[in-house]
Image (spheres, rainbow, N blue to C red):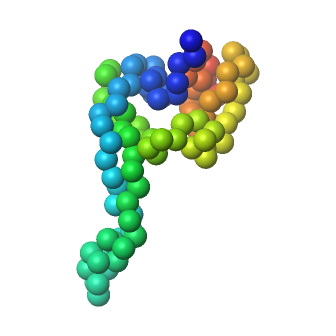
Amino acid sequence: MKVTNKTICLRCGGKMSSIGVTKLQLGKASLVFGNWSNLLEGALEVEPYECSQCRKIEFYAKGQTGSAGGTPQTVCPACSESHDFDYPKCPYCKHQY
């Protein structure tokens, strides 16, 4: 069984677990309109994952994983598994780039 990218911490290799679904507000507050422009921008629904070892948090767009989420993919030269391009090491074999 292939492990999904969300279940392995990119930093320490620990187990990641979902801590729910939340919305991140888009936009910014202005001096003239205050928070009204912020409310008009909408929100992005994300699913945060927390590492049980190092306590780091990763955010994933709700309902999107891997290449469907828009993150470019790369193939590990050591184990030939495909994963997100921005990972500092392969989440499957721990090969450092």
Check the image and report above or below for 41 versus 43.
Answer: below
- Examine the rendered structure and indicate whether residue 63 appears above or below residue 1: below
Q: Quarter of the image containing the N terminus?
A: top right
Q: Residue furthest bottom?
A: 32
Answer yes or no: is residue 94 visible.
Answer: no
Is 34 displayed left or right of 45 in the figure?
Answer: left
Query: Which residue shows up at 62% across the image and 30% down it?
Result: 83
Residue situated in front as seen by the camera: 13 or 71: 71
Q: Position of residue 31 (x, y in %)?
A: 28, 83
Q: Is residue 17 visible?
A: yes
Q: Quadrant of the C terminus?
A: top right
Q: Is residue 85 left or right of residue 52?
A: right
Judge whether 34 appears above or below 77 on screen.
Answer: below
Dividing the picture into quadrants, the one containing residue 14 is: top left
Looking at the image, which residue sits at the far top? Answer: 1
Residue 24 quadrant: bottom left
> Which residue is found at the position 62% from the left and 19% from the top?
95
In front here: 60 or 14?
Answer: 60
Q: Residue at coordinates 29% horizontally, 78% vertically from top-left?
A: 36
Who's the residue at 37% across and 60% down the image? 43
Residue 67 location, x and y as percent? 63, 39
Horizontal and vertical percent position of residue 86:
59, 39
44 sits to left or right of 83:
left
How many labels, in total? 0
Q: Quadrant of residue 93?
A: top right
**Residue 47: x %, y % from top left:** 38, 40
